[in-house]
Structures are given as C-alpha cells and as structure tokens.
Image: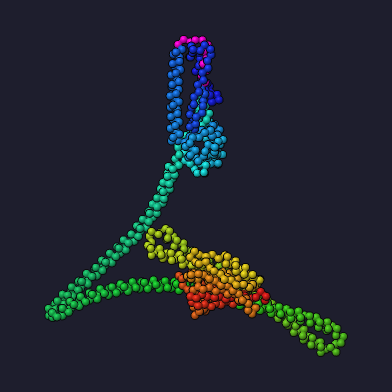
Amino acid sequence: MNNTEKNDKKEILLSTDQITFNEKKNDQLLLLKKELPTASNQKTTNIAEFIVVNTKPVPNSTKHITDIRLLRDQLKAKEQLLHNHINAINTSNASIEFDLEGNILSANKNFLEIMGYNEADLAGKHHSLFVDSAYSKSNAYKLFWNNLKKGIYQKDEFIRVAKNGKLIWLFGSYNPILDTQGNPYKILKIATDITLAKTQFLQLAVQAQEKEKRASELVIANKELAFQNEEKEKRAAELVVANKELKFQNEQKEKRASELIIANKELAFQNKEKEKRAAELVIANKELKFQNEQKEQRAKELIIANKELAFQNKEKEKRAAELVIANKELKFQNEQKEQRAKELIIANKELAIQSKEKEKRAAELIIANKKLAAENILKQKRKVEKEKRAAELIVTNRELAYQEKRSKELSLANDELKKAQEELEAFSYSVSHDLRAPIRAINGYTQILTEDHVDAIDDDGKNVLRAIIKNSNKMGVLIDDLLAFSKLGRKQVASVNINMAALLNGVISDMTIDKDENIPIFEIDVIAPANGDPSLIKQVWINLISNAIKYSKYKSETRIKITSTSKNDKIIYSIKDWGAGFDMEYYDKLFGVFQRLHSQEEFSGTGIGLAIVQKIVNRHHGTVWAESKLDAGAKFFFSLPDIKH
C-alpha cells in the first residue's frame, strides 16, 4: 500500500491483486468522504480517495472485499478513539495549533477563555502575541522555535500574556505533529491553567519569608528578655544577700535582746513591776524601730526622687538659660546692627552735606584766587582784602581735611557694619545647625525605640515617646520661626506701589482650611493701595488672617471683616474677627517673641507670628496695634505710607 499527502487529501492506491469487483467490468472509481475532527474541535472534511483499478477478474475477490470491510471497521474504530481523545483534551485542557513559522492556525474554546481572546483576534497572528516583546526578540526564543522545527518535544511551565495584559501560568507541552515521512509540519500546544496554584504558591512563599522575619525578630526579643531576666536574677541575688545580712543583724539584735531579757529577769526577780515595764519597753522599741526603718526607706526614696527632679530642673534651666542667652545675643546684635545702620544713614547725609559745602568752598576758592591774581597789581590797595581771603582759604582747607577724615571714618563704619552682618549670618547658621543636631538625634533614637523595641515598652512608655517626638518637632518649628524672625532684620526692604486689593485676594485664595474648621466668610471694603515691599506685606496679611481663622474655630461661624482708611499721609488697614479674643490686661505681651495669651492645647502655634508682623510694619515706618475683648473677638490695625507720599 502506497500513501501520499497532497492538498489535505489522502490518496490510497490499491493494486489489482488486492481488490476486484465482479459486478463491474470497466474501471471503477470509489470515493469515500469522511469527516475527521481536528484539535480545535471543528470539523473539516478530508476526502479519502480510494482509486481501484480492475482490468481483469481476480479470483478470491470475496475475501478481498471482506478484508477491505475489516480494514474499514478498524479505521472507524481508530477514528472514534482519536475523536474520544480530542474530546477529553478539549474538556480539561487548552490547545492551540501553529505552523512551523509560529503563525496561529486554530485554538480551542478553553484556550480562548483562559487568554481572553476570540477567534477573530487570533486570525493571522503570531505566537509572539502571547510572550513578552523583549523575549520574542531574543536568541532563546529563536532557539525554542528551531528545536520545534527539528521535531524536539518541549515540556515546561510557561508564562504567557493574556489579552488584558495579565500574566497566565500554563503547564503543558509543545508537540510537533509529523507527516508520514516523520517530518514536523505543524505544532500542537496542549496546556493546563495553573495560574491560581502558582499564585497561591508565591503567596505561601511570601508568607514564609514574613514568618522567618517575625521569627528573627522574636529571637531578638527573646534575647533581650533573657538579658532582662538575667538582670532581674542578679538584682534578686543581691536582694537575697542583703536579706541575709539583715537577718544576721536581726539575730545579733535578738541575741542581745535575749541577754537583756535575762538580765531584766534577774532584775525583775527583785522587782516584778520593773520587769513588766521592761517588757513593754522592748515591744515599744521594736515598733519604734520598725517605724523608723519605714521612715528611713521612705526618706531614701524621696531623696532619690528629689535628686532626679533637681537634675531635670537643672537641665531645663540650663537649656532655658542657653536659649535666653542666644536670644539676648541675637537681640543685641540686631540692635547694634540697627544702630550702625542709623549711624551710617546719618553719616551719609553728613557726607552729602559736606560734599556740597566742599564744592561750594572750592568754587569760592577759585573765585578768590582769580580775584587775588587780578588784584596783585594793586597789592597795597588790596592788602587787607588779600589777608581776609587768605584766612578764608585756610579755613576751607581745614574743612576739606576734616571731610576727608570723616569719609574715612564713614568707610570704616560701613566695613564694621558689613562685618557685623556676616557675623550675624554665621551665628544664625550656627544656631540653626547646633540646635537642630540634638533634635534630630532625639527624634532618631525615639523612632528606633518605637519601631524596634515597641514590644518591650508599655503604654505609658509609648505615650512618653510620642510626647518626646511631638515636643522635639515643636522645637524644630520654634527654631525655624526664630531664624525667620532674625532674617527680617537683614532683608532689604523694597519700596514700590502695592495694589493691596489684588495682594489681599491672592492671599485669601491661597488659604487652606482644615476639615475641622469653618469656611471663613470675608467682608472686604474698598482696599486702598500703599507703598512698601509686596512680599513682606503679604506675610503680614497671611499671619493676621491665619490668626483670625484659628481663634474663631470654636465659634458657630468664622466671619472676618477687612477695611482701610487714610489718615495723615498713612493708610490704616484693619482686620476684625469675632473669635476668642484676648484680655487687654496682657496687651504688652501680645507682640513679644514666643509670647502666647492662650494655651497650646486650646490653640496651636509658636507665638512668633505677631512679632514678625510688628517687625515688618516697623521696617516700613508704620505702626501695628490691636483692640480686643475676651471671647468677643479682636481687631488688629497696621499703617503703611500712602502711595501719594
């Protein structure tokens, strides 16, 4: 029997000695059409053509027909078995067919459901659709397909990319399908979806790592607990020794007491009444001794507590003293700087006046010299006038010499002022760095305790640690505010016309309101322009409006009114709120640095905002003041130069 494959048709040629038919004398052609199921669960019609050539009657034709029928039945059985296998695969597995170049031929329903595609999506597509783009261009991918083309079977766990981009784990094989010559002509992939099992396995691996991590942390905690237990045992051993010593002393005392009792008994033999009194005295002494020991123990504990409290107070006083000294030095330097600046301004004005006088004297000297030259012919007649002019010339020269000396002094004053500014900047940097370093250390060590030793700390200890972190952060904010306050004295103040209405609207639009605060209601009259530094005046508005919002948060509504008036070449601005207000009795502390009229728990803040406002307004040659009544709101005023002047 000869088999050939051509155009998806199988041709089977039977020789004349294999089959013959007596019923037909001419050559006959028998076509048998059979539908064969494919791997994609679709039916395609394959035509098996049986070409029978019969030229002469052949004996035993009945036997050959029986053999053909037997072969036909065996073929049907094989086809049924193949059909059952394909149905079993399609029921529990995903399958897809490729040609040798990796182009998709067909895919079953399970594969389409797992990967999220339909048949139209895969039409004309390549195998690289299911893999990572980088892998599809790699040599490993080319080697994979070269091995399949050679007929090498591939079996492993594969990661494939679904239509929605999700990674799918498949366990299965790539099976080369061979023709009758043993050469592969297409590839059949059969696989099972193991994504759920693989995901659970990876989750178990992550959980195992977490358990190992917790176990290592538990080992460290056990070591620390063992160390603490050793310390406790050591203290217990010391306590046992102390108890033994105390017991020995008590035995000695009891021995002495027994001796005393014997002596008392001998004495009581003579006087029973004295024996009774002595016994009562012994009991009273024991009670008194016990009370004295209790008092001594309480006194020792009190002494230790007092020492600790005294040490803490000394540390607090030391820190407070250092901060006071730093504030005094900073205040002194600012005062010196302002004094030098005022002297410099006065000296510059004097120098300008002297320069004008010098020019005037020089012009007069030129005129005098000209007149003196013209009057040399009349020496005798102009002698008195000449002496007068000579005296004026001497005075002028002296004035010029004085002006040159004053110029040198002014230059030295400028150098000293510049040096003082540099020293103040260096001091500010040093204060910022030196004060921040211990704060960062406190925060770091406290964070280590809260993260690495949280199990060894009780609730009271955790509250103390949170208080340390909160207060160290507050100290950092205080340092920032202090530096910002000190820099105001060094900042050059610009003098431009300010559109105050636009500046105020910008500040209000930039305000952020916390969730627990009311949305403020602003009542703004016509706001007049003024002259000053826009960035500094913006900070004034920010501080005053923020205070008005903050101190009104416990009211049913937050209402703020802003106005402006003109008076004596000044523009007076006001901002009024109906919040908590303050007691005017403490008005002298209102604009002080770190001065607060309300508790930190009631209203947060550092107590430097109004001090900054006052310094900015003073540098604009203005004034700031306030009016208030407790629990009835407050009204703040500040003045700036009128834009017309």
- Colour mapping used in the image: rainbow
154 up-or-down from 209: above or below: above
The residue sitting at the front extreme is: 23
* Side (left or right) of 391 relative to 530: right
228 up-or-down from 250: above or below: above
* Side (left or right) of 524 relative to 222: right
Q: Nearer the viewer, residue 384 or 445?
A: 445
Q: Which residue is pictured at 40% across the width and 59% down the height?
A: 453
Residue 52 shown in magenta: yes
The residue sitting at the left extreme is: 269
Residue 519 shown in magenta: no
Quadrant location of the C terminus? bottom right
Q: Residue 380 placed where, x, y %?
A: 85, 89
Res 487 visible: no
| Overall secondary structure of the magenta section | loop
Numbered-mark total: 0
Q: Residue 157 placed where, x, y %?
A: 46, 38
Q: Residue 62 placed where, x, y %?
A: 44, 13
218 up-or-down from 22: above or below: below
What segment carries the magenta color?
49-60
Q: Residue 430 placed where, x, y %?
A: 54, 68
Q: Which residue is pictured at 54% across the width and 71% down the height?
A: 560
Res 44 visible: yes
The picture quadrant where one finds residue 497 is: bottom right
Q: Which residue is pictured at 54% across the width and 37% down the height?
A: 120
* Side (left or right) of 352 relative to 637: right
Q: Nearer the viewer, residue 156 or 561?
A: 561
Q: Which residue is pictured at 42% across the width and 60% down the height?
A: 450
